[in-house]
Image: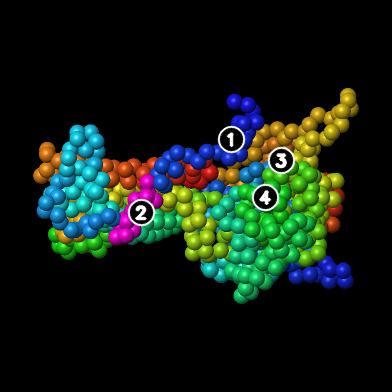
Amino acid sequence: MSAVAAAGGRKRPHPDWKLVVSLAILIAVGVMAICAPWLAPFDPEAQQILNRRVPPVWHAWLYGDAKASLLHPLGTDALGRDYASRLMHGARVPLLIAFSALAVSGVIGVTLGVVAGYYRGWVDTVISTIIAARLGLPIMIVSITAVALYGASLLTISFVLGLLLWDRFAVTVRAATIQLREMEYVEAARATGASDSNILLHEILPNLAPVIAVIAALEVGQAILLESVLSFLGLGVQPPDFSWGLMIAEAKVDIFFDPWLAALPGVCLFVIVLAANLLSEWLEIRSMRLGSP
Amino acid sequence: MAGDSFDAAGLAVKPVLEIENLAIRFPTRAGLLHAARGVSFSLSKGETLALVGESGCGKTSVGLAVMGLLPKHAVVSADRLEIAGTDIRGMSQSRLDRIRGSRVAMVFQNAMSALNPTLKVGTQLVEVMTRHTDCDARTARARAISLLERMKVDRAAERLGHYPHQLSGGLRQRVMLAMALMCRPEVIIADEPTTALDVTVQAEVLALLKELQQELGLAVIFITHDLGVVSYISHRVAVMYAGEVVETGPTPEVIDNPAHPYSGALLASVPRFIQGPAAPRLGVIPGAVPSVMHEVTSCVFLDRCTMAADPCRRGPIDLDDAGLGRAVRCVRSPLRETSHPGTEGRTS
């Protein structure tokens, strides 16, 4: 390759494949979930008793299955409901829960982390103890207990996950804040008369943004997985509402006869969590390259 | 005291900064670290005092003490620590916040790390002013632009929209300077503001600082180890060694005729660009800086001094007036023996 081409390449670098792939997946899934009522070809709850367990369209191409057709590209389930429509609608609950849990856990974790890292001393000791206590709580058992006590609803699950998933935010933000508070521009801000709250909001928080973004992307994937686990165990949303986890649970009786019924929501879950992790990784590498803590 | 200043009419001017017997100690695991002891000086409007000394001599600690910015575990004591007549000893954080940036401001050594990388420089400049005065952002912005223009920054309004990493080192230092001046403070503490810059930019920034200082009547504490800079910028100089001021006086006199052996040795270790057989060897000071971990029982420069004698060992040496606005902490100083017969009884 010529030097000119190399220089040109550096000027406009190819966007990282991790960013492209993860954003494409996340945006596609997001649009599908939000617009499911308009995009889905069928009512996800309309049952067609005569059209039960229609296999996905590729069964027609691969095995010459006469029942499979483009009418139901991803087939139908045991009650004859269009599986493509159900998968689209089934993404709404996990995404909704993941993002509301993220908002709750982000606020708790970032606040605790910043306060502990900035003030140190006994405040730090207390918060570090709270973090350690939280890390000692088994997430599954606590969520099962909470659902048993307060019932399985969107709100309960969002809050339970939000109240349980802040530890990574707190630990990372605390470590980053300890580094940031020693920065010269924090001292410079203090030299211009900035109060603690000024410094926290204007000097520390904006510089934490890369760290927070990395953790947030990671936690979205984590929250989606946890919601699915809870739904799979029957502790999440209850029928007739449904999510990918619940669809896997319903399909498990048919797993030896119609494995695609369980595989399709499983693949969806795998892909979206992978996308979240890829995005987090890309953000992490980028923030390291920019020299942020 | 040597620091008294007089205005044109010969009347004593009330100093804007007065420090008397300032001591800064840091409790460490190995014991008490004396970062500064017995530091006294005063500073009037329009005057620049250079604090000179090698690394670790306590000059930065003194600057931070005036700002109230020393770490919480530092033990600061002083008979007097006043900015424009306001005693800042034991002042609460929130009252200190009100003084910092408005009456006394600081310029830091490294403008890259002293500016927040995530905020536009305009935001950072405006913030300083809106924090201390009830003026709106637009007025503050206009002041920022006029200050930057005053500092010969071209396209000043456009620069406000830039992030620190988009500016050159010289520009960043000018922004730092503008930030310090936003609220028209009386005292500026400049902690090696030009050390991180290359020589041409350094000269520009120094010239600018000198100009502004005269124009605005600022009192400046200029912390540096560069003696060339000292003679250019300062009216008076205080040489620090191991936490003590060993000599103070008007800059030209101290540079031309140092009264303390340490000042003399420091000046002799500045390289001179003379070639050929007549070239003098670069002066060095034998030995190392003494530990500041214990109380002073003799002259602090004793171990490295070529003039050391018996009286130097008898106890801590006082900073004594040597006439002509000079003071020196040396019993064997030629200045003290000639100009102050009164102290001779103690030296012999």
Seen as rendered, the residue at the extreme front is A66
In which chain is the residue bearing label 4?
B
* Residue A293 horizontal side relative to residue B175, left or right: left
Which of discs 2 and 4 lies nearer the camera? The answer is: 2
Q: Is residue B308 above or below residue A249?
A: above
Horizontal and vertical percent position of residue A83: 22, 50
> Residues at marks 3 and 2, common chain?
no
Residue drawn at (59%, 44%) of the image = B292
Residue drawn at (70%, 61%) of the image = B157
Q: Residue under circle 2?
A: A30
The one nearer the camera, B311 or A78, is A78
In which chain is the residue bearing label 1?
A
Tell me the kind of residue under disc 4: Leu
Residue B11 colored in magenta in the image: no
For numbered disc 4, what is the local secondary structure?
loop
Q: Looking at the image, can residue B160 be seen?
A: yes
Q: Which residues are magenta?
A: A25-39
Q: Residue under circle 3?
A: B310
Tell me the kind of residue under disc 2: Gly
In which chain is the residue bearing label 3?
B
- Mark 2 or mark 1, earlier in chain: 1
Q: Quadrant of the N terminus of chain B?
A: bottom right
In which chain is the residue bearing label 2?
A
Work out how far the residue at label 3 is from the one at label 2, CA to CA, in angstroms. Answer: 85 Å
Work out how far the residue at label 2 is from the one at label 4, CA to CA, in angstroms. Answer: 40 Å
**Magenta stretch mostly in which secondary structure?**
helix
Residue A13 occupies quadrant: top right
Horizontal and vertical percent position of residue B89: 58, 65
Q: Residue under circle 4?
A: B167
> Residues at marks 4 and 3, common chain?
yes
Work out how far the residue at label 2 is from the one at label 1, CA to CA, in angstroms. Answer: 32 Å
> Residues at marks 3 and 1, common chain?
no
